[in-house]
Amino acid sequence: SAKINLDAYLGLLTLDGTLVNVGAPAEPLSLRVMNLIGHRRSFAGSLIGGIRETQEMLDFCAKHNIVPKIEVISADQIDEAYERVLASDVKYRFVIDISTM
């Protein structure tokens, strides 16, 4: 849901490729229309994928070793993590180690 350089990502698509946005950034996104027209690329949006699409994405990621960048925190670090979110001091998604609950 962050403002990203759409043109950079569209440039990674092959002929007839589609980039799907599943976030809702607070600011408008912009792109160069020729990045779509020139290679018959598409830019689409979805609030959420269905179960089938989600499984396809997970299978694709597993096959290609695509993994999220996360920061594992313990339960006693939740307040600190929240403060870091408010201060925009976060690089990766926080994952709480449930064994520390």
Image (tube, rainbow, N blue to C red):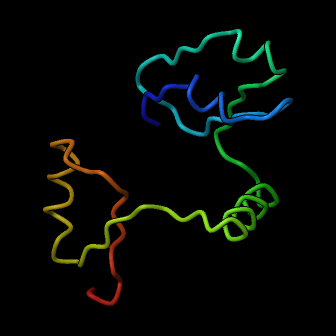
46 sits to left or right of 84? right
Quarter in which the C terminus is drawn: bottom left
Q: Position of residue 29 (x, y in %)?
A: 51, 18
Q: Position of residue 31 (x, y in %)?
A: 58, 15
Q: Is residue 67 above or below residue 83?
A: below
Q: Position of residue 40 (x, y in %)?
A: 84, 21
Q: Is residue 74 above or below residue 20?
A: below
Quarter location, residue 45? top right
Q: Position of residue 51 (x, y in %)?
A: 77, 60
Can you name the residue that lies furthest to the top here?
Answer: 33
Q: Give the mark count.
A: 0
Residue at left offset 21%, top offset 42%: 88
Residue at left offset 35%, top offset 83%: 98
Q: Is residue 62 above or below residue 97?
A: above
Quarter location, residue 61? bottom right
62 sits to left or right of 2? right
* Nearest to the observer: residue 78 or residue 63: 63
Q: Is residue 39 above or below residue 78?
A: above
* Nearest to the observer: residue 71 or residue 35: 35
Residue at left offset 79%, top offset 24%: 41
Residue at left offset 49%, top offset 62%: 68
Can you name the residue that lies furthest to the bottom here?
Answer: 99
